[in-house]
Image (cartoon, coloured by chain):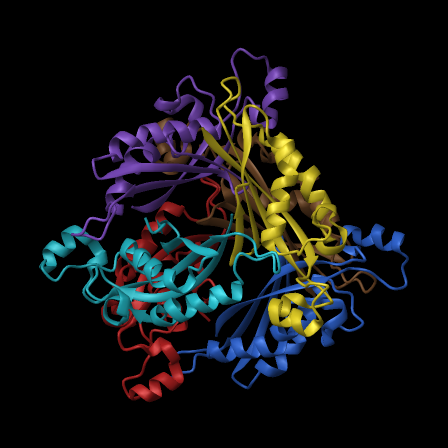
Chain colours: A purple, B brown, C yellow, D cyan, E red, F blue
Amino acid sequence: MVFITRKEHFNAAHRLFREDFNDAKNLEVFGKCSNPNWHGHNYDLFVTVKGELDPLTGFVINLKDLSRIINHSIIEKMDHKNINLEVDFMKGKLASTENIAVAIFHELENHINTNKVQLHCVKLYETENNFVEYYGI
Amino acid sequence: MVFITRKEHFNAAHRLFREDFNDAKNLEVFGKCSNPNWHGHNYDLFVTVKGELDPLTGFVINLKDLSRIINHSIIEKMDHKNINLEVDFMKGKLASTENIAVAIFHELENHINTNKVQLHCVKLYETENNFVEYYGI
Amino acid sequence: MVFITRKEHFNAAHRLFREDFNDAKNLEVFGKCSNPNWHGHNYDLFVTVKGELDPLTGFVINLKDLSRIINHSIIEKMDHKNINLEVDFMKGKLASTENIAVAIFHELENHINTNKVQLHCVKLYETENNFVEYYGI
Amino acid sequence: MVFITRKEHFNAAHRLFREDFNDAKNLEVFGKCSNPNWHGHNYDLFVTVKGELDPLTGFVINLKDLSRIINHSIIEKMDHKNINLEVDFMKGKLASTENIAVAIFHELENHINTNKVQLHCVKLYETENNFVEYYGI
Amino acid sequence: MVFITRKEHFNAAHRLFREDFNDAKNLEVFGKCSNPNWHGHNYDLFVTVKGELDPLTGFVINLKDLSRIINHSIIEKMDHKNINLEVDFMKGKLASTENIAVAIFHELENHINTNKVQLHCVKLYETENNFVEYYGI
Amino acid sequence: MVFITRKEHFNAAHRLFREDFNDAKNLEVFGKCSNPNWHGHNYDLFVTVKGELDPLTGFVINLKDLSRIINHSIIEKMDHKNINLEVDFMKGKLASTENIAVAIFHELENHINTNKVQLHCVKLYETENNFVEYYGI
C-alpha cells in the first residue's frame, strides 16, 4: 500500500456566520471571520490517494488524472469564487475549513475510488498556521 | 546604511473591476479576478526600512516599534476586510496588488520616516507566485 | 472525526548534556549540541486536535481558543527562554526535541481534552530538517 | 512511542518509460516524463523512525547516526545521478516516485531497525506539488 | 515606477562540462555536476517587470500576459527537457545557472519590453540554496 | 554583471543587552530579547557575490568555493555557539541581527573579493519574519 499526494490551490472569499444569529452574536462566536463584507484566503489543498502499485506504470494513480479530477470537481468551482454564495456543494453549510474539507472529500471520493485505489485524506490549509485533515471516517 | 525587513500578514477579500466597464468588459480585462461576488487572498507584506545603526541599540529601528506601526496603520484596517469596500486608503482605487502596495507605502512613510531612518520598500505577495515591490519613486 | 492543526512558534536556547557525564563524554554523545555556552533554535509547534464537528459552528474547536491555550500553557513559558533553566515542565529532563514534544503534549492535554475533542498530536520542528511527533501513546 | 523525522535531499535525472513500449506509447502513458533525453528533480526525502525514548539520551535515535545511514545508503548513490542508469537498487524498475520511495524504504530498513527502533515511513517529494509516502506494509 | 514579479517553474536535466576537457578535468572543475549521465533540478524562475501603473487597469502588466509570454518562450522549451541537448537558446553554452539566467533574460526582453514596461530582472533558483540574478547589464 | 547567492545556516544562542544598562533598562529597550539566560535562533544566511561570467566555466564564482569560504569563516565559528560569548568577530558588539550581518560582511569580503568578483550583499534571517541586508556601504 502506497500513498501519493497532489497539491492544488484556490483563492476564494468566504465568511463565517449563521443566519439565525444576529451580527453581534456572529461576531462573538466567529470573531472577525464573520465580517459581512467577506474576507478571503489562498487555500492549499492536498489530496492523498492510497493503493497498490500498478506494475505496468509504477503508479498508484496517474497524477495527471488525479490533477484533472481535482481541478474539474473542486478547483474550477472554488477558485476566485465566494464559497458561501457560489459553490454548489457548500450550499447551506457553514464555510468553516472543517466543513469545506469534509465536503471536498465527499465530492472527490466517487471520482477517485475504484477497486484499486481509494481517496485517503483531504488536507486543507486556510493559512500557513491553520489546516484541517479529513479521512472520510 | 543597513536594511531591515519585517513581515506581516493579512487575509482579505477584493475584486478587480471598473464601474465604467460592464461585466463582460470587466471579465475581458480582469478575468476571473472580476468576479462580482468577490474572492480573496492571504497577503504577505514585507516592509523594509533603511538607516544607520543606532550605536546605543545596534538597531536601524526597533522591530517592536516597526511592527506596531504596520499593525496600527495597515493590518488592523485590512485584515479580514473587503479591500474595495472597507479600507479607507483604497477608496476609489482599483484593488490591484500594485495599487495596494503603493497605497501601503504612502500610508506608512509618514509614520516611519525620521531624520535617521527611511521607509525603503513595500513588497506585497498576493499569492506565492505573484508579488509587487514599490520604492516610493 | 476531523483533525485540525494550529501552528505556533517560539525561539529558545538549550543544550543537550547529562550532569553525570563530563564534558568529553557529553561531547561524544551529544556533539556540538552539548556546548556549555548554549545554542538555540526557532521552534515550530504544530498542535493537532481531533473531534466531531460542532453542528452549531462547523468547528472541531474554535482556533482562537486553541491558540490561547497553546500560548498560555506553552509559548509564554518557552519563548525567548532557556529551556534547561527556565521552563518548569522541563525541569530535570534532557532538553531533546523528543522530550520537549512529549512534555508539551502532557502540558496541553488537560487543557484541551473534553468529552468532545481530544489532543491528537504534537509535532515539533527544531530545524527545517528535524522534527518529532508524539501521539500520547 | 515517539516518531522522529530527518529530511535529506538529492538532485537527480530520470525518465518514466517501459522498454516494451514504443516512444508513442510511452508518451501516451507517461507524458512529458517519458522524454528520452531525461529530465530531473530536486528530491526531498523525509525518513521517519519510531521507538521508545532512550532514558540516557532522550533520543529515539541519534540524528547524526540516522543522517549518516541515509547519506551512506541513499544520498551518495542518488545525488547528481541518473536514477534509471546509475542507482543499483533501482535497476530494472520504473523510476516512478512510488517505486523510488518503496526501494528507499527497503534499502534503509535493515540499517535502521533494531529491537528498539523501527523505520516507520519514507516520504519522498518529487516536486512541491507531488509526494509519496510508504510505510513498508 | 512599480516592480511586479511572476514565479514560474520547470523541471529539467543538465550537466556541467566542457567538450575540450576530458572527464577527469571536468570532474575537477565541475565536481559531481559533470556526471556524464546527467542529473536534474526543479528550477524556480522569477521574472520581474518594471513600469508605470496603467491608470485604466492599475497594472504594470497584466499577469496573464506575462505568464503566457514566460510559458511560451521559456517553460514550454525547458520543462521536462535536457537543457544541454534540447533547448535552442542554450545551444553551445555551458548549462550553468548563470548562463541559463542570462539566456532567459535575453529570450524574454523582446517579448516584454515596450515603451511602457521593461524586463527588470530574471532570478533563477537551481536549488533552495543557490540562485542567480541577472538585470541585463 | 551577474549576481549569485548561496544560502547557509547556523543555530546559535544570543541575548540583546548593554552592560552599562541594568536589567530593568535592558528589558525596557530590548524586551524579552534581553533575557539573561539567553535564547536562540535558526539563522539563515544568504551571501550574494557579483561579477562577470568566467567564459571557461560559466560561473561568477564556483559555489563549492563560496560555500567553503562561508563555512570556514562564519558557520564553523557561529553554529551551535553563543554569539555574545564565543564568536571572535562579535566581541564587544551588541548581538543585534544588524550588527551580526555587518560583521559577517566584513569577515567575508577579504576572502571573496578579487579583481573579478565582489561580495555584494549579506542577508541574514533571524526568524522568518525578520531579516537584515547589508551591502557594505
Where is residue D115, by image quadrant? bottom left
Q: Residue at x 77, y 63 (%)?
A: B58
In the image, residue E94 sits, relative to residue B36, either above or below, namely: below
Left of C104 or right of it: where is E43?
left
In the image, residue E71 sits, relative to residue B80, either above or below, namely: below
The picture places residue C21, in percent across and down from the top left corner, at 69, 68
Q: Nearer the viewer, residue E60 or F48?
A: F48
Where is residue F48, by image quadrant? bottom right
The picture places residue E128, in percent across and down from the top left corner, at 46, 62
The picture places residue A76, in percent across and down from the top left corner, at 32, 34
Left of C33 or right of it: where is F17?
right
Q: Nearer the viewer, residue F113 or F87?
A: F87
Residue D34 in sight here = yes
Q: Residue at x 57, y 30 (%)?
A: B81
In this view, which residue lies farthest toward the top? A20
Q: Residue at x 51, y 43 (%)?
A: B97
In this view, which residue lies farthest toward the front? D115
